[in-house]
C-alpha cells in the first residue's frame, strides 16, 4: 500500500496530513474500541492505518481480502476527546494505546509491515516524538 493513497483519503476527508505520522496496526477487540466507533471494523477488518496529528487520530480500516483502504469506514477521533496516546515497547512489537473519553483503544504495531516500506520510517519518527 502506498502512503500517497492514504494521504489522498485523508485530504478527501478534510484531515490535515502530517508527515511521518501514519502507521499500520492491528486492533485488539475491546469495549473501548467499540465505544469509539470501531465496532463494525474491529473483527472483520483487524488491520488499520492510523494517522496521528494535531487534529486528532484518524483510523482507516484495511480490507483483509483485498488489502485496500475502506474509506467509507473511516473513524476520526478529535483531539478534544483524546486523553493520552502512549506507545509501549514489547519484545517483537509495540503497543499503541489511545485513551479517549469513551474508553481505551489498543493496537499491536509491528516493527515492519509487509508491502508498506513507509511504516518502519514513520514508526521511528512517532517513537521519537512520543519520548520527548
Image (cartoon, rainbow, N blue to C red):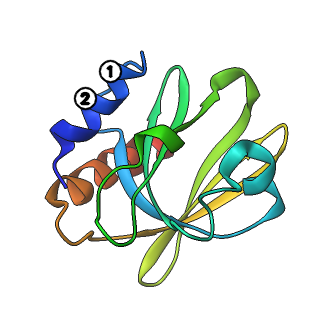
Q: Residue at x 26, y 32 (%)?
A: 7
Among the 4 quarters of the image, the one containing residue 30: bottom right
Residue 9: % across, % down: 32, 32
| Number of other residues with Cα within 10 Å of mark 1, as a class: few under 14, some 14 to 19, many 20 or more | few
Dot 1 lies on which element?
helix
Residue 79: % across, % down: 64, 24
- Taking depth in this image into account, of 9 and 100 the one nearest to the observer is 9
- Taking depth in this image into account, of 63 and 29 the one nearest to the observer is 63
Alpha carbon distance from label 1 to label 2: 5 Å
Point out which mark residue 8 bears: 2
Dot 2 lies on which element?
helix
Callout count: 2
Q: Is residue 124 left or right of residue 5?
A: right
Q: Is residue 35 above or below residue 27?
A: above
Residue 56: % across, % down: 56, 28
Examine the rendering and report whether any part of residue 10 can be seen: yes
Q: Is residue 115 above or below residue 40?
A: below
Residue marked by disc 1: 11
| Number of other residues with Cα within 10 Å of mark 2, as a class: few under 14, some 14 to 19, many 20 or more | few
Q: Residue at x 53, y 20 (%)?
A: 55
- Taking depth in this image into account, of 72 and 118 the one nearest to the observer is 72
**CB of mark 1 within 8 Å of CB of mark 2?**
yes
Q: Is residue 31 above or below residue 127?
A: below
Q: Residue at x 26, y 71 (%)?
A: 112
Among the 4 quarters of the image, the one containing residue 63: bottom left
Residue 36: % across, % down: 74, 44
Q: Is residue 36 above or below residue 79?
A: below
Amino acid at each position: 500500500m502506498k502512503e500517497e493513497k492514504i494521504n489522498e483519503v485523508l485530504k478527501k476527508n478534510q484531515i490535515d496530513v502530517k508527515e511521518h505520522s501514519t502507521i499500520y496496526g492491528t486492533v485488539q477487540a475491546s469495549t473501548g474500541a467499540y465505544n469509539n466507533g470501531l465496532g463494525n471494523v474491529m473483527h472483520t477488518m483487524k488491520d488499520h492505518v492510523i494517522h496521528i496529528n494535531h487534529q486528532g487520530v484518524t483510523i482507516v480500516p484495511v480490507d483483509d481480502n483485498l488489502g485496500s483502504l475502506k474509506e467509507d469506514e473511516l473513524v476520526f477521533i478529535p483531539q478534544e476527546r483524546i486523553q493520552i496516546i502512549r506507545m509501549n515497547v514489547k519484545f517483537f512489537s509495540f503497543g499503541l494505546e489511545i485513551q479517549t473519553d469513551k474508553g481505551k483503544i489498543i493496537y499491536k504495531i509491528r516493527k515492519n509491515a509487509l508491502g508498506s516500506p513507509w511504516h518502519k520510517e514513520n514508526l521511528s519518527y512517532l517513537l521519537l516524538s512520543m519520548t520527548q
